[in-house]
Image: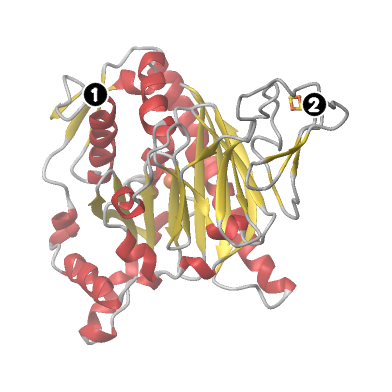
C-alpha cells in the first residue's frame, strides 16, 4: 500500500474522534434473513455472481511454473487454470470433449503437467486445450466435425491476481472488476509472492457468512475474548471498491503512530487489511505475509473454503517456512473453533425461519455494502423490499 494511502487512512482514524465513531457508516440496514437460506435466491446468486463473473480465481503464485495448474468450480462449472510454456495462462473447462470426464481433480492443484490425459478413454490434449490424440481409436471418430478442443474461457492476470469468466466469452476488464482496489493491491507487489501452504475445509453455512465473519471487528472482544481479546478496536476502516470492499481491522495501539511526524507514519504494522473480491475470495494483507480465501458455495447452507498463505519471497530456511505455516494454523484454529462453529449455528437458526430480519449496524458498514451489492447484482439496480434503511 502506497505510503500516501497509509497516511490518508491514518488521518481518517486520527480524526474519527471519541470511540472512533467517525468510522461508522451513515445508516444501519435491515436485511431479509431469507437471503441466507432461500434455495432460489442461492441459485440466482450462483448464476449471476459465480457463473457469469468475472470472478477472482487466485494468485499468480498458485500456478507459477509452466505445467502448474489449479482447478476450481464456479456454480458447478469446472475450470482448470494452467501455465503455458510461454508463461501465459489458459482457463479451460475441465471436461473431456468425448463424454465429459474431468481431466484433472476438479478441486486440486499440481505441477509438471505436460498434457491433459483423460482418465476415461485417454483422449489427450495439449496444455492450451488442443486435442492431440485419441489413442486406440483409429478412424472411430473420423466422421465427427464438432470441435473437440477443450473449451477455453477468458482469463486475465495482473497485479499478481488471476480473474476468469467461468460461464461466458466476454473478455475481462480486470480494473473494472477490481473497482479501484488495484491501486492498493498493485502496490503490495503480489506478483512476487510465493505460495507456502493451502488448506481446504467445508462448513455448514451459507457462503455469505464467510464475508460476514470478516466484515467487522465488532465481535472480536466478545467471541474472541480468549484468543484476540483486547488486541483490536471494535471499529474498523471501510472503503467500497465497486462491488468489492476494503476493511481494515485496527490494533488497539494504532494511536501510538500518531506521535510520529506524518510522513514517517505507517498503517501496515497496525492493520489487518482485507480486500473482499466479491463473490469468490478475499486477499488479506498481514504485516509480513498474505492470506487468501477462496470460496465455493456447495449448497445454500454449505460452503467450501480454501485458505492459503503466501510469503513475500521464498523462505530462506525451514524455520522461516514453519513461521508462515504456523500463522496459517493459528488463523484456521481461531476461525475453526470460534467463528465458523458459531456461523453453523447462525445458519441453523436462520433456516428455522423464526426471524424475518437481521440488522447490520453503523459499526458494520462493510456488511451493509456487501449485502447491498449482492442484492443489486441479483435483483437489479433498485433493490426491492430485500433491503431498506433501518
Ligand atoms: S470421456 Fe474423456 S476420453 Fe472418453
Ligand atoms: Fe472472528
Can see residue 224? no
The secondary structure type at the circle numbered 1 is helix
The secondary structure type at the circle numbered 2 is loop
Q: With respect to residue 149, does 238 lie above or below?
A: below
**What quarter of the picture does the C terminus occupy?**
top left
The residue lying furthest to the right in this view is 136
* Distance between mark 2 and mark 1 Cα atoms: 41 Å
Report if the beta carbon of the residue with label 1 is closer than 8 angstroms to ligand 2.
no
Can see residue 275? yes
Q: Position of residue 2 (x, y in %)?
A: 31, 74
- Please report whichever mark, 2 or 1, sits nearer to the chain's N-terminal start: 2
- Numbered badge on residue 120: 2
The residue that appears at 15% across and 54% down in the rendered structure is: 21
The residue lying furthest to the top in this view is 353
**What quarter of the picture does the N terminus occupy?**
bottom left
Report if the beta carbon of the residue with label 2 is closer than 8 angstroms to ligand 1.
yes
Tell which of 121 and 279 is nearer to you.
Answer: 121
- Numbered badge on residue 379: 1
Neighbourhood count class around disc 1 (C-alpha, 10 Å): few under 14, some 14–19, many 20 upward: some
Q: Position of residue 228 (x, y in %)?
A: 46, 55
In the rendered view, does 280 fall on the left or right side of 76? left
Amino acid at each position: 500500500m502506497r505510503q500516501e494511502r497509509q497516511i490518508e487512512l491514518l488521518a481518517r482514524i486520527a480524526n474519527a474522534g471519541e470511540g472512533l465513531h467517525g468510522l461508522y457508516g451513515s445508516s444501519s440496514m435491515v436485511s431479509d434473513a431469507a437471503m441466507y437460506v432461500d434455495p432460489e435466491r442461492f441459485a440466482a446468486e450462483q448464476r449471476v455472481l459465480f457463473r457469469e463473473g468475472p470472478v477472482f480465481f487466485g494468485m499468480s503464485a498458485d500456478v507459477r511454473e509452466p505445467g502448474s495448474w489449479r482447478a476450481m468450480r464456479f456454480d458447478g462449472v469446472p475450470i482448470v487454470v494452467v501455465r503455458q510454456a510461454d508463461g501465459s495462462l489458459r482457463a479451460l473447462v475441465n471436461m473431456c470433449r468425448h463424454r465429459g470426464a474431468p481431466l484433472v481433480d476438479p478441486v486440486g492443484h499440481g505441477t509438471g503437467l505436460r498434457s491433459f490425459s483423460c482418465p476415461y478413454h485417454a483422449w489427450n490434449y495439449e496444455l492450451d486445450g488442443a486435442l492431440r490424440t485419441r489413442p486406440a481409436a483409429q478412424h472411430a471418430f473420423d466422421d465427427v466435425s464438432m470441435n473437440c478442443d477443450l473449451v477455453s474461457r477468458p482469463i486475465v492476470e495482473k497485479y499478481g491476481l488471476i480473474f476468469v469468466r467461468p460461464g461466458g466469452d466476454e473478455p475481462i476488464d480486470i480494473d473494472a472488476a477490481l473497482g479501484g482496489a488495484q491501486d492498493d493491491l498493485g502496490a503490495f507487489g503480489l506478483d512476487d509472492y510465493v505460495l507456502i501452504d493451502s488448506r481446504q475445509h467445508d462448513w455448514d453455512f451459507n457462503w455469505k457468512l464467510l464475508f460476514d465473519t470478516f466484515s467487522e471487528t465488532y465481535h472480536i472482544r466478545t467471541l474472541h475474548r480468549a484468543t484476540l481479546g483486547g488486541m483490536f478496536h471494535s471499529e474498523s476502516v471501510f472503503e467500497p471498491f465497486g462491488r468489492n470492499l476494503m476493511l481494515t481491522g485496527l490494533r488497539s495501539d494504532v494511536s501510538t503512530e500518531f506521535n510520529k511526524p506524518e510522513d514517517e507514519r505507517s498503517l501496515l504494522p497496525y492493520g489487518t487489511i482485507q480486500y473482499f473480491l466479491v463473490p469468490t475470495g478475499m486477499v488479506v494483507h498481514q504485516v509480513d505475509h498474505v492470506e487468501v480465501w477462496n470460496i465455493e458455495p456447495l449448497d445454500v447452507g454449505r460452503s467450501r473454503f480454501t485458505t492459503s498463505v503466501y510469503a513475500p519471497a521464498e523462505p530462506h530456511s525451514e524455520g522461516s517456512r514453519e513461521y508462515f505455516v504456523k500463522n496459517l494454523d493459528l488463523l484456521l484454529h481461531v476461525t475453526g473453533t470460534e467463528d465458523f462453529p458459531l456461523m453453523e449455528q447462525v445458519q441453523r437458526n436462520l433456516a428455522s425461519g423464526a426471524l424475518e430480519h437481521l440488522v447490520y449496524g453503523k459499526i458494520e458498514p462493510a456488511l451493509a455494502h456487501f449485502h447491498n451489492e449482492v442484492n443489486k447484482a441479483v435483483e437489479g439496480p433498485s433493490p426491492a423490499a430485500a433491503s431498506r434503511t433501518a
